[in-house]
Structure formats: C-alpha cells, structure tokens
Image (tube, rainbow, N blue to C red):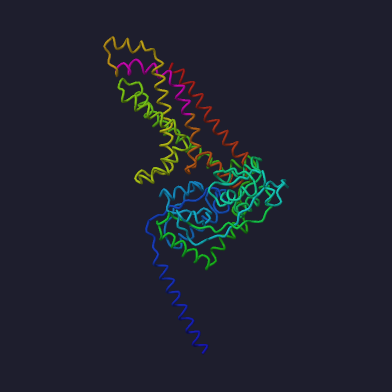
Amino acid sequence: MKKWLATLGIFVSLFAFGRTAHAYEEIKPLKDEYVIASDSSYAPFVFQDASGNYVGIDVDLMHAVANLYGFNIRMVHPGFQAAIDQVQAGQADGMIAGMSITEARKEVFDFSDPYFQSGIQIAVRADDERVQNKTDLKDLNIGVKNGTTSQAWLQDNQDTYGYRITTFEDGSALYDALVAGHVDGIMDDSPVLDYAINQGRQFRIPLAPIPAGEYGFAVKRGQNPELIAMFNSGLATLKENGQYQEILDKYLANPNAEDAQTVDETTYSGLISNNWSRLLNGLWKTVAMALLSFALAMIVGTLIGLFSVSPFKAMRIFSTFYVDIIRGLPLMVLTYFLFFGLPQVLPALSLNDFAAGILALTLNASAYIAEIVRGGINAVDTGQMEAARSLGLGYKRTMQKIILPQAIKIMVPSFVNQFVISLKDTTIISVIGVIELLQTGRIIVARNFQSFRVYLIIGIMYLVVITALTKLSKVLEKRVK
C-alpha cells in the first residue's frame, strides 16, 4: 500500500512539475527589451549605492525575474511621479517603485500579484514629544510625497485630525524638510522610515503603523500582459526557491550591508572622494543641455526676432503670437507637455527625457532671445535705416551691413545673461527624470542624508561655472565694442 502511494505521489509530482514547466514555457517576452521605470530615491526599495549603481528590493527583484525568464530590461529612474507619467505616456513598459495597489490606480494600470505588504507611519524629530496619538496632530504641518498612499490617507483624514499637509515631489526633499523644521512631521511607508532611522536620521515614530495595502508591479492597462504574467510566475518561483527572502533580508535585515566598505561621507573630503565622478557627470549634463539648447535657441530666437521687425505684417503677427505663447507658459508646464502630454496625442513625437528637456529649454529661451533681438534692433537709431534706404540700399542689405552690427553690440550682455538663466533652468528639467547636477545631488542625499554638505558643494559648483561665464561675458563685451 505504501509503495503504491509513493508511486502515485511521484506520478502526481511529475505531472504537476510538467504542468508548471509547460506553463513557464508558454509565457514568452514579445520585445527584445522592456523599459522599466522606477523611483530614484526610495530606500530600501530603490536607491543609488556608494558606487552609483541603483540597488534595492525593487531593482534586485526586477532583475531576478528578468534573469529567470531570460528577457532584457532597461531600468530608468526618473522619480515616482515621473515614472507613473512615463508608463501612462507609453515611454516605459512597466513600473516598479513601491507603488501600492489601489482601486483608483487599477483604473489606469494592470497590477501583478503583490510582492510586498506595507504599512504607513508618521515620523517626527527625535526631540519632538508633542505627538503621542493621532489627536495630537491637530494644527501640525505634515509632509508627504506626492502620489503616494500616505498622501491619500492624509487627505482622507485631514478633517478628522485637523493637521495641514505639505506635498513634496521626492523623498530626499521630504526628509530634509523634517530635519530643517519646515514641517512638524512626515508620513511615509514603514520600511522606508525604518531605513532612514537606521542610516542615522534623528527621527521618532510615535504611532503604530497603518495598513497601507500591497505593492505591485504595474503596466499600462491593457498593455504588455505577458510582462505581468512573467513577473507573477517569476515572483512565485523566487518565493519557492528562497531568493525572494534573500532579497528582503539583504535590505531589511541588514540595511547597512551595501555601504559597509565605503568611504566615510560625513566629511567633505569623504563625500567628494566618493561622489566626484557622479557630480562631474551631473555638471557635464547640465552644461551640455545649456549649451545645446542655447545654440538652438539663438537660431530660432534670432529668426523670430527678425520677424518682429519685418516690414511684412504676417511675420510680425507670427512673432508676437510665438513669443506670447511661449513666455506665457511656465517652463515646467512646457516640459511636462512635451514629454508626457504630446506623446499621448501624437505617439510619433515621443521623445526621450534628454531630447524633451533640450526642446523645452530651446523653446523657452528662444522667446526671450527674440525679444532681445527685437529690442537691440529697435535701439539702433531709426535714422540709420532711413539714411541707408535713401542711398539705395535694400532692406536686407541695410539690416545685414548697418543695423545688425550695431545691434549685436547692444545684445551681447543680454545674450550672456540669458545663457546663465538657461543654465539655471536645467534644474527644472529634472522633473522628467534627467539626472543633471541638482538631481544627482538629490540621489546622493537619499543615500547618505548629508543634505547640507551635498547642496553646499553643488552650490559652489554652480557658482564657479556662472562666475566664469560672467567674467567671459565682460571680456567678450570689450572685444565687441
């Protein structure tokens, strides 16, 4: 009898294994490479380690699933809200960023099986004893990251407990606000707060965690179903073979393991020696974006400026319309429209983050350059034009030989000033995920929490570059004159 049962058990096991293997083989990737969007600073789920590599529970889990199925992924880290927007715009195939599965999100996303059960908690400064229960939150200012479950809970319970809400776009800014005293408390996911405290943040968690649902991998609703199927099957396999628990233990049980051998970043020398290459890369991207966009803006802006003083009414109307539209749009709104909005209407115009940033900076600067050109030309005495025309010179020849050479001398200081503004405006482009100098600093702060030192170094780098440009402009001014 026992022998018969053992034989039957082996048969059933082989049959079940055969079905599992068959089901495993049935799911096939439909693309050579999938783009997976994620957050940039959400430790321990995703963050940059001391070597500049993105690591964390979400990153390791996604790579483990991809390796299991043998498909290629390219992970991008624009930040939580930008990652959501990229998936919705079709610029990313999926998203894994500690995103809670909610009914509202199911309206626009298809979710995988849950891969993590989380709770949310409120944290205050370690020396702040005001909060002992939820009723103590009355009249306090609570910070939260935009688009999160914590934000939804705070909004739903604001009338009940009477606190104020301040919203931040990324985790590093949220945590820095509490350290600096700009908010009285913050609300975030429990493992993220625990990680921050383990890394040295002087926070206290006075209240018990609030169940916040489950994290899931997401794709745009109705798209890439094979990606969800592969993730679900891979997640189940990783749980069975123990690799899933190893990933969790790596970041939750021993959160300092990743940085155990790194340089001490609590000093300026250690901070610079461990991050100088990333800071220089961020600076290079900042300068490259400013130079490229400004060169294009000079071409477009000069043409529009010439249109504004053209004898043809249609050109003047077009110039006025262009300048009014572009100057009337904040740069951030223009950037969001070009990167997230336009591709949803015209998919063929989908741009990567760098190209969209360049285009936004170009359009923005060109409108101001057009006004500089118009003002410079109008500043030349009108008698110059009249004298040239009376001598028989045509309009084009007069502009080329007489008006523009005089106008350029007037325009040079304004051009340099506009370039400095464009250089500073690159910080705004980080909202779509471009890792320029400021965003590089935010990512570093998310790992080591050295806000003052990191932002001081970045401020000095900007100051050196802009001061050099100012000196150069003065030399150029003298030579032109």
Residue 418 appears at what percent x and percent y?
A: 46, 27
Quadrant in the rendering for residue 377: top left
Q: Position of residue 270 (x, y in %)?
A: 62, 43
Q: Which residues are magenta?
A: 397-419
Which residue extends farthest front? 159
Q: Between 480 and 77, which is closer to the camera in this rendering?
A: 77
Single out the residue that lies furthest toward the bottom.
1
Task: Answer left or right for 466 relative to 178.
Answer: left
Query: Is 308 or 165 nearer to us in this picture?
Result: 165
Residue 415 painted magenta:
yes
Q: Is residue 253 above or below residue 353?
A: below
- State left or right for residue 314 relative to residue 228: left
Residue 103, position as x, y percentages in the image: 50, 56
Q: Main secondary structure of the magenta part?
A: helix
Query: Does 172 lie within the magenta span?
Result: no
Residue 359: x percent and y percent? 40, 37
